[in-house]
Image: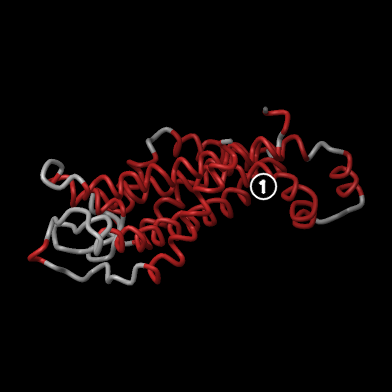
């Protein structure tokens, strides 16, 4: 049941992010100050925010941003992590020791604090949020791939390729890395949820997307001063974040069960 639910949630959010702005054509930045903080209505199904902007429109445009940041961060982190982890696991020796110590140093600090520090230095923007999260997120992929490669490099077909004189890039790209992709796919699915939460957290703190661009985290920050007189300002983005994170976690669990039946 959770497998289908995860796929349905993720698919629904993706479709809403793509086609939603055409279904709900309201301008997410258009203000209607006389009707600010208006509740749910037929014209505005999720109400208006503190500046009279349509919350549903901002929610849909914010979904685009969250998914874009999540995909970019996961792609960047996976690319760096696979490369570093494969080299460390296959070559071993001093290179493995250096990379291992670097990963231990990064894991010694909470990831969100490192992201906050990096964005504070680079400046608040979507690009810098992606760079900061990517600089931290590669460690999980590198550790995962390194552990997989330590087993794969001892398999007969890899040793045969080495005995035939195949160059290192060919061995890694043709024989070693493809065998790790199932585990990386599961990690990437779960990493999407983490990247979306991290982006929302940074935007909540004012270090992510800058106004007037819509962001779920910024919407939460703007609505916290109206928790009692206009709770819909925080309920809508809060539920959206919870729903999409739950969907990706369910989808990741389903992928893990399907790709590795022994883990059931």
Residue 17 quadrant = bottom left
| Secondary structure of residue under mark 1 | helix
Q: Can residue 122 be seen in the rendering of this structure?
A: no
Q: Can residue 242 be seen in the rendering of this structure?
A: yes
Q: Residue at x 80, y 50 (%)?
A: 175
Q: If the image is split into quadrants, where does the N terminus sit?
A: top right
Q: Residue at x 81, y 56 (%)?
A: 167
Relative side of 32 to 11, left or right: left
Q: Nearer the viewer, residue 199 or 39?
A: 39
The x and y percentages for residue 10 are 51, 50
Relative side of 125 to 154, left or right: left
Query: How many other residues sit within 10 Å of disc 1, few (<14), some (14-19) or many (≥20)?
Result: many
Q: Nearer the viewer, residue 174 or 196?
A: 196
Q: Residue at x 72, y 32 (%)?
A: 261
Which residue extends farthest left? 34
The x and y percentages for residue 19 are 45, 67
The x and y percentages for residue 262 are 73, 28
Q: If the image is split into quadrants, where does the C terminus sit?
A: top right
Is 247 located above or below residue 170 in the figure?
Answer: above
The x and y percentages for residue 33 are 10, 66
Q: Nearer the viewer, residue 121 or 76?
A: 76
Which residue extends farthest front? 42
Q: Give the total number of marks visible in the rendering.
A: 1
Residue 231 quadrant = top left
Query: Which residue, given by chain and number where applicable, does mark 1 sit on?
Result: 87
Q: Residue at x 24, y 61 (%)?
A: 44
């Amino acid at each position: 049941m959770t497998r289908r639910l995860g796929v349905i949630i993720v698919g629904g959010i993706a479709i809403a992010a793509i086609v939603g702005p055409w279904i709900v054509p309201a301008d997410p930045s258009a203000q209607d100050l006389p009707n600010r903080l208006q509740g749910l209505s037929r014209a505005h199904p999720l109400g208006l925010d503190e500046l009279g902007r349509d919350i549903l429109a901002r929610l849909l445009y914010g979904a685009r941003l969250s998914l874009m940041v999540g995909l970019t961060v996961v792609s960047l982190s996976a690319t760096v992590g696979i490369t570093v982890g494969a080299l460390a696991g296959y070559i071993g020796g001093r290179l493995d020791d250096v990379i291992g110590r670097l990963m231990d140093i990064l894991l010694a600090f909470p990831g969100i604090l490192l992201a906050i520090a990096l964005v504070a230095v680079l400046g608040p923007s979507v690009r810098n949020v992606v760079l900061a999260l990517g600089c931290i997120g590669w460690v999980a992929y590198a550790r995962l791939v390194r552990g997989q490669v330590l087993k794969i490099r001892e398999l007969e077909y890899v040793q045969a390729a080495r005995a035939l004189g195949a160059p290192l890039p060919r061995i890694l790209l043709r024989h070693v890395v493809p065998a790790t992709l199932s585990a990386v796919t599961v990690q990437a699915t779960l990493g999407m949820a983490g990247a979306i939460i991290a982006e929302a957290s940074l935007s909540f703190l004012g270090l992510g997307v800058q106004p007037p661009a819509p962001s779920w985290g910024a919407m939460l920050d703007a609505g916290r001063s109206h928790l009692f007189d206009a709770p819909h300002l925080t309920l809508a983005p809060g539920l959206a974040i919870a729903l999409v994170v739950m969907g990706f976690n369910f989808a990741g669990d389903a992928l893990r069960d399907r790709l590795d039946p022994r883990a059931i």
